[in-house]
Amino acid sequence: MHYLMLICGNEEWEPSPAELAAVIADTEAWVKEMDGRGVRRFGDRLRPTGTATTVRVRDGETLLSDGPFAETKEQILGFDLIDCADLEEALDIASRHPSARLGSIEVRPLWPFGED
């Protein structure tokens, strides 16, 4: 079953160069391990929320606003699509992601069209 991991954190976090290097190295190690296991299908970082545009259509009018809709310090920084046997495995994989120690990871099963 496919699960989407939403990597959440605080964009305002300003790590030291050593902290940043450690997070990058840990993340690259996680990606390499999950790719090697054939669990990770796709994933990437997201540009900062300042590059986001939110789209709404109300009464036939398209409304665009800069930035994300959510007004919170915690933002979605990236995502990974993983293929796991069940939720238990997906949660275990998410708990190993370095960002789980710094922010949070939301794990949601995909709900393919055509499935009830």
Image (cartoon, helix red, strand yellow):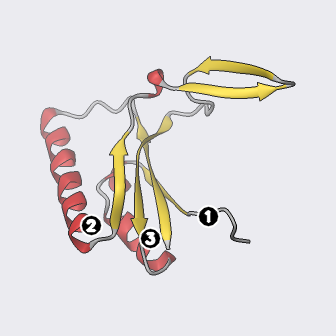
Residue contact at pointers 3 and 2, CB within 8 angstroms: no
Look at mark 3 in the image and give the residue it sits on: 91
Q: Residues within 10 Å of mark 2 (few under 14, many from 20)?
A: some
Q: Nearer the viewer, residue 15 or 57?
A: 57
Q: Secondary structure at mark 2?
A: helix
Q: Is residue 57 left or right of residue 30?
A: right
Amino acid carrying mark 2 in the image: Met
The residues bearing labels 3 and 2 have C-alpha atoms spaced at a distance of 13 Å
Q: Is residue 94 left or right of residue 14?
A: right
**Residue 42, numbered label:** none
**Residue 112, numbered label:** 1
| Badge nearest the viewer, 1 or 2 | 1
Residue at the spot 50% in from the left edge and 26% down from the top edge: 52
Residue contact at pointers 1 and 2, CB within 8 angstroms: no
Residue at the spot 45% in from the left edge and 22% down from the top edge: 51
Q: Earlier in the sequence, mark 1 or mark 2?
A: 2
Location of residue 75 in the rendering, given as x and y in whole percent from the top left corner:
48, 38
Above or below: residue 84 compared with residue 4? below
